[in-house]
Each structure stands twice: as structure tokens, then as C-alpha cells.
Amino acid sequence: MPSLSIPITKADDVTQCVFGWASIAVTKTGESLVDLQGDVIDIYDLEQAFYEYVKASGELNFHHTGAIRGQLIEAMVFTPEKLTKMGIPPGMVPLGAWVGYHLPDRADYQQAREEGLLMFSIEGMAERVEV
């Protein structure tokens, strides 16, 4: 199974917003993805986890610690059913969670850009199941 880093896809220096994939469960070629912790996430488990995250906080911090640096402004979990309903053919978009965050403090935004915080990361609790 492939493993990869997922960069910030778009950053807007005027609005101080960043966008990108928070997690990809299945690549565009149909392969399950192994995350940095060696886990594989089912797209439907990812979908439910993101619903809970959005309802609970939608907050962004750096490296899972410290003060809240930003707030979720956009989220979409792409599942096969949603892609079909949108008319997007299989293989065009990975199955995963797309996010956007606003970092209101200019220093936090610049730190994220300058330090190369190039990946979003899911913070939460889950039960690991051997596959």
C-alpha cells in the first residue's frame, strides 16, 4: 500500500487561508493509503470521524499541541456515493477529506508557511483493528 505526504494545495496570503487534503483513504488509482502512523482508514470511518470533528470544534493547532491557531472554514469527505452524485468519474479524485482553515493571526499563518507545515493531520481517538 502506498504512503505519501500531502502538501497544502492552496494558500492565500491575503485571507490567510490554507486548503488541502487532511486525509486520503483511497488514492485515485484505487489503492488504500497507509498514513504516517502505519494505519489504513476506511473511507466511511473517516467520514464519520470528520463529522464528529466538525461538530465538536473544527479547530487547528500545530503538531497536535498548543494553542488553537485556526478554524475550519471548509470540509468535504469524498466518498464513492458523493462523487457519483456530483458526476465525478472514479479515478478523478481520491477518496478522502478535503479541508480549509483560516489562521487569523498573521504570525501563525507565516509560521505555518515558513516552517513548511505542509501536511494537515487528523487529531482524535480511534480503536485500532488488525487487518
Image: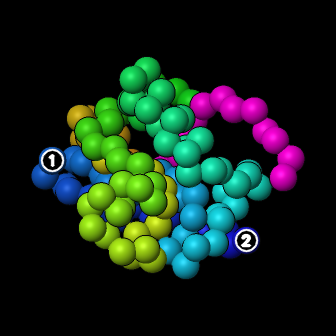
Q: Residues within 10 Å of mark 2 (few under 14, many from 20)?
A: few
- Residue at the (57%, 64%) spot, across then down: 26
**Residue type beneath disc 2:** Met
Of marks 2 and 1, the one in the foreground: 2
Front residue of 11/108: it is 11
Residue 102 screen position, x and y as percent: 26, 40
- Mark 2 or 1, nearer chain start: 2
| Residue 130 located within the stretch drawn in magenta | yes
Residue 110 seen in the figure: no
The magenta stretch spans which residues? 112-131
User: Which residue lies at the image location 50% right of the left edge and 74% below the top edge?
Assistant: 28
Q: Position of residue 55 (x, y in %)?
A: 39, 23
Q: Residues within 10 Å of mark 1 (few under 14, many from 20)?
A: few
Q: Please check the rendered image and state whether residue 51 is part of the magenta-colored stretch, yes or no.
A: no
Residue behind mark 1: 15
Q: Which residue type carries mark 1?
A: Thr
Helix, strand or loop at label 1? It is loop
Instruction: Determine whether, in the image, residue 130 is placed left or right of residue 43.
Output: right
Q: Which secondary structure type mostly characterizes the magenta part of the structure?
A: loop
> How many numbered marks are there?
2
> SS class of the residue under badge 2?
loop
Q: Is residue 90 left or right of residue 4?
A: left
Looking at the image, which residue is at 73% across and 71% down?
1
Residue that badge 2 annotates: 1
Farthest right residue in view: 130
Q: Kindly indicate whether the residue at mark 1 contacts the one at mark 2 (C-beta within 8 angstroms).
A: no
- Point out residue 15 in the picture as x, y percentages from the top left corner: 15, 47
